[in-house]
Image (spheres, rainbow, N blue to C red):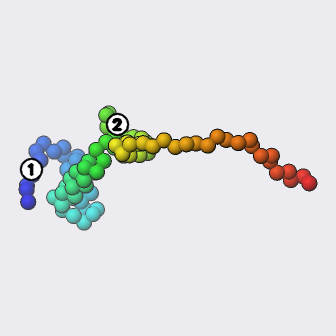
Amino acid sequence: MASLTIRKLDDEVKKRLRLRAASHGHSMEQEAREILSHGVGEAERDPSPHQPNNEPVGLGEAIRRRFAPLGGMELDIPPRGPLREPPKFDE
């Protein structure tokens, strides 16, 4: 297993990591490992869940990005027929 040293970590980030680890019953080191593992796993599964400015995209756009590499398909949409008469309830 490899080791990693993170220098110049903001004190507030370290405090939040410590609190998060405590709430999960982990050490800070274990919590950091889980955060990194989850973050890298997310990046590998879906490389583009955000727009270029790092804002999340909507559900429709996320679905389009997920399935766009598979190609599309053309559907024959049948023409609409005349509307039927609405029911009469006064009789």
Q: Earlier in the sequence, mark 1 or mark 2?
A: 1
Mark 1 crowd level (few <14, some 14–19, many ≥20, 10 Å Cα) = few
Residue at image position (85%, 51%) is 88
Kind of residue sitting beneath label 2 = Gln
Which amino acid does the dot numbered 1 rest on? Thr
Quarter of the image that includes the N terminus: bottom left
Quarter of image, res 77: top right
In-front residue for pair 46/27? 46
Q: Residue at x 31, y 34 (%)?
A: 52
Q: Secondary structure at mark 1?
A: loop
Q: Is residue 58 left or right of residue 33?
A: right
Q: Quadrant of residue 49?
A: top left
Could you say where residue 9 lies in the image, as x and y percent from the top left?
16, 45
Q: Residue furthest top?
A: 53
Q: Are marks 1 and 2 in contact (CB under 8 Å)?
A: no
Q: Which residue is mark 2?
A: 51
- Residue 5 has which mark? 1
Task: Locate residue 91 relative to residue 42 in the image: left or right.
Answer: right
Q: Quadrant of the C terminus?
A: bottom right
Alpha carbon separation for disc pair 1 and 2: 30 Å
* 36 versus 62 height, above or below: below
Question: Element under label 2?
Answer: loop
Question: What residue is drawn where x is 32% and y is 33%?
Answer: 53
Q: Residue 6 in the image: state x and y as whole percent.
A: 12, 47
40 or 85: nearer the viewer: 85
**How many numbered dots are placed on residues in this image?**
2
Position of residue 74 in the picture relative to residue 13 (left or right): right
**Residue 59 higher or lower than 23, as above or below:** above
